[in-house]
Image (cartoon, rainbow, N blue to C red):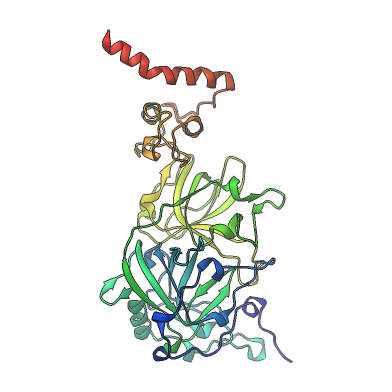
Amino acid sequence: MTRHLPLSFAVMLALALPLRADEIDWASLPYTDIQTMQAVNGAGGPAFSGGAFPLKVRGVILNNPEDMLDSSVPHPAGPFDLGAMWQMFVQTVDVNNTSDFGGVALFMGQKYGNVPPNLTFPGGVPTPDPSAHYDDATWLSEVDRVNHSGTHLLRAGDLIEVRARAGLFFGGKFNINEDHQTDPDFNFEIVHLGNVGLPTPEPLFLSSIWDDGNNQVLFDATRATGGEHYQGDLVRLMNVRLKDGSPWGVDAKATVVDAFGHEFRLHLGLNSGFASLPTPFGAFDIVGVFNQEAGAGGPFTKGYEVWAMDADEFRLSGDANHDDSVDGADYTIWADNFKLNGDFEQGDFNADGKIDGADYTIWADNFISPATAAIPVPEPATWLTLFVGVAALPWFVNRKRRA
């Protein structure tokens, strides 16, 4: 009886043997737009052809690999488990004047013999092929290779060129990888072009990408909006709370909710700072990579998450002075900068570049009194009174000083 491979692997793109390294003129090869690489069809499957390889892309590294996946050995693993893994996200830098957007993951796994087609099913029993694995020493050598460009240790914020010979579509996105091969002809290389710093995270409120009719993140195959638009981008997830009972800590797959009850997955990375970051009480903002992990068999229209890598990018919503309390001192900062342009530390709590009433609402929603009781949001009439009072505050203080 013929045994068919699971759908998850049927949707992977099998690639032809790549050109040898000395057969590729990388300098003459044009850059591929990452938005094209991540193009999907109406079912969320790949619209990008694996036959486009070899290719090269240019972008900014969004994460230090050790903060995302565990590449250490020994790393025992069984069927369908790649064991030690390495991953880096790269967000596009538009080089073709096409308003390119989005990002792509670079990925390697140690034990390719644990997944089809190397994993076989004699008698219906999944049987790995150890000959398709990297041994521990070779794996560590490969990790060292992709962690460096020459002698430079690659870090988040570095501008790089990625020279890729192979890739696979899996879980809703197209990755640059080795096509699950240990043959060096499938390797990708990273060329360091300088350091430009991390891109400014895009502010993201769940309500702005939510499909209320289907109660999930909006899937839009055109990538004009919804989850597909943000795929691979650095975002700042805004004004969410930890769902009751959700895990919190290193490598936790937490569930967060917004003010409208939308639930969303927040994956905390391996950064050691998450071990000492207290379980949050109240709303918070956090920076991470917008990612899709739709699962092996799909549907590839779901599975969105934010993968946070830096515990220092966590902050309570409305906590302008970062003292881990939303209180009167933060209100004073907001009031001092009311109607001015500024950033979070000046009272711009919704990241729109200006300090206004919308920021006050975020502060008020999250204000905790000395008795730890949240104050109610002002009614419209109270709002007007407050605005008049805040607007008059500088005039009153100045008159008092002159008196």
Q: Residue at x 40, y 37 (%)?
A: 319
Whole-percent x, y for residue 266 in the image: 51, 54
- x then y, percent, for residue 90: 43, 66
Percent across and percent down for residue 151 are 25, 75
Res 79 seen here: no
Q: Nearer the viewer, residue 272 or 355?
A: 355
Residue nearest the viewer, comparing 78 with 176: 176
Q: Is residue 262 above or below residue 122?
A: above
**Is 12 placed left or right of 159 in the picture?**
right
Above or below, comparing residue 82 to residue 329 in the picture: below
From the top left corner, tell me how far across and down residue 144 is, in percent. Answer: 32, 77
The C terminus - image quarter: top left
Give the side of residue 20 with respect to residue 207, left or right: left
User: Residue sitting at 36 percent across and 27 percent down?
Assistant: 336
Q: Quadrant of the N terminus?
A: bottom right
- Compared with 304, 259 (above or below) is above
- Specify whether residue 23 is in view: yes
Number of on-image labels: 0
Question: At x 39% / y 40%, what residue is drawn?
Answer: 343
In this rendering, the answer to whether 370 lies above or below 64 is: above
**Along the line of sight, the residue nearer the viewer: 67 or 54:** 54
In this view, which residue lies farthest toward the top? 403
